[in-house]
Image (cartoon, grey):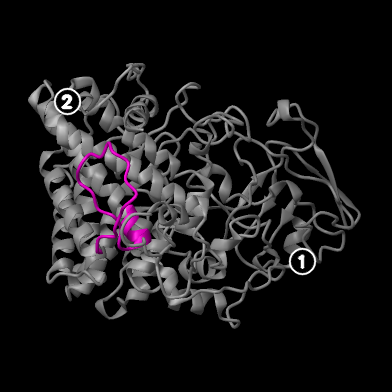
Amino acid sequence: MKNKVRYYLIITALLTGVSIISGCKKLLEPEYRSSLGPEYFSTPAGLEAGVAGCYAICRFFWGSEGFSYTQNAGTDEMDGRQNGAEYFQYNIISGDGSLTGIWNNSYVAINNLNGVLEFGPSADIEAGRKKALLGEAKFMRAFFYFQLVQSFGDIPLSLKFNTTPSTAAVRNPISEVYDAIVKDLTEAAEDLPVVSSGNSKGRANKAAAKHLLGKAYLARGWSAAAKPGDFDMAYTTLNELITNRATYGVDLEQDFASVFRNGNEYGRENLFVLDRNTDAVFSESGYNNTNAPDGNKENRNNHYWNPNYTVARNINSDGTASGSLPGSVANNVQLCNRNTNDGRPFLRYFPTSYTLNTAFGERTNDSRYSKTFKTVWICNSPSTASSFFQSTLPALSSTRNGVTSQLVPNVDTAIWMPGREVTIAERQAFKGCIIAPSQYTDVMFPALVKHLDSTRLHFNDPSDRPYILFRLSDSYLLGAEAAFKAGKIPEAVNLINTVRRRAAYRSSYTPAQLASAQAAMDITPGQLTLDFILEERTRELYAEYCRFQDLVRTQSLISRVTQYIINPAVPSYPTVPKRTINIKACHVLRPIPQSQIDRVTTGPAFPQNGGGCY
């Protein structure tokens, strides 16, 4: 068993570490040995591989469906009807595989990193490179512990490499876990280079360490383990990153739309990116790769937030209703086929009324609604899978009120969601299908554009795009939250207004128009509340895997789910009934995996999170 544990850790580092390299043919080559032990971490190759493998473990999380529910579902921002009901309705059990995956994979990475930090200092490798690698290891260990403590509360804390299986374990209090996180990140921020090290951009640097350190101080400040000055330390750390952003080689993009533009994943705003590439061997994103050893590491973010645009039909002949569902009486003609640009309609999430009408309700000066949601689909029917978007396709005949019009594939808009109600005259004048907000359903709704990937070979392929984990606008908003909690209201307002002024930018504006919109976006100290901060986080960070933890951190989960989801007075989509949601105060922590509890057979029993939730 001892050798098996060692083998698993080292081979994990070698075999999963290769795919973090983007745009570079140099790969970490696996080295197979009959006996692998801690001494391997003290070699240059072992030190490199031990760190690299832990980045690859992140692919079990951001991009996988199960993990997405743990971070997105059951909040005020989004609903879903196809899968993940246990998270939307808070019927989560201790045997849930997604939570077990977070626990197990994080501790595999942590033990690997413990080995790196324990034995790596003796590696015969250039001093600067060694310092950077050990800094990365400290950052990644803190990164995984932060995910665990945010999800489960008190957890086992180990900072030593373990090669011997044990049937005993205890839960350390969150105060000890946060102390270890802060220590690792403080040292990592000193040791890491300004730019990503090694032969891949998808690695930690100073900016990423400072961002996570500031967030850790902020989270601890809200928690039962709070220390005096946590909010001040969070603000100081994040503000230092923001003030000296040029030194760290980062800055806000001028245009919010540029942040998630295909190919700009390593743009100037993005601080830490989970790397991926298009190499068929190492990308872990191949089409129908779910049965492969690492198939559950695919990045399917490009699928989850898409409506089923293929079921949209034309309006009825009298112009009184949109054919947004199959069977529209007069013109039951499919206007769009599934295609690579628009993505696979996987239907896992759709935006709630709060998201569309409260957070993104103001759309005159704030450009983020139109840059977050896709509301237009171009006709590509009739067609076959092999001839999408070919200009030679015949026009699609469409008849309303006795008048025949032509929908020209690749030219005419087939589906339009204007985000407002429309008149019958507007419908009659429009060739395609108009779907107004009163006609949104759980299969037809505005689509998320942030994670779409038009570079795939097949429309059902998962994404090969790197995933953006930390970005500078979030540093601004976290800094504003910290300043707000520390009583630094003018500083908080200034940070939020910087993000809001960026949101006013539209490429079509004249300088005078931009200045006017930016002035309209500014808020005053009297407008700053915690609810406003949370709404601003929705506008800026919707569907970026942070909402559940945002609400838990700010002690707002129960109140906002009650206010915006359970409240019968809040409108929902007309065809989507209200859910029965069993949320309780104890749901702010996830259940400890049952497998962990069952395996502790020596010493005190391993306790489950209490409160009657699990």
Query: Measured from the top left, where is residue 425 in percent x and y?
Result: 76, 64
Q: Which residue is mark 1?
A: 424
Q: Is residue 515 visible?
A: no
What is the quadrant of residue 565 in the picture? bottom right
Q: Distance between the Cα atoms at labels 1 and 2?
A: 73 Å
Query: Measured from the top left, where is residue 142 in percent x and y?
Result: 24, 48
487 is within the stretch colored magenta? no
Looking at the rendered structure, the kind of residue marked 2 is Ser
Query: Measured from the top left, where is residue 218 in percent x and y?
Result: 23, 64
Looking at the rendered structure, the kind of residue marked 1 is Ile
Q: Main secondary structure of the magenta part?
A: loop
**Is 435 situated left or right of 269 in this image?**
right
**Is 453 situated left or right of 189 in this image?**
right
Near mark 2 (Cα within 10 A), the count class, few <14, some 14-19 or many ≥20, is many
Name above or below for residue 298 compared with residue 474: above
Q: Which residue is mark 2?
A: 42
Where does the magenta region start and end?
A: 147-173
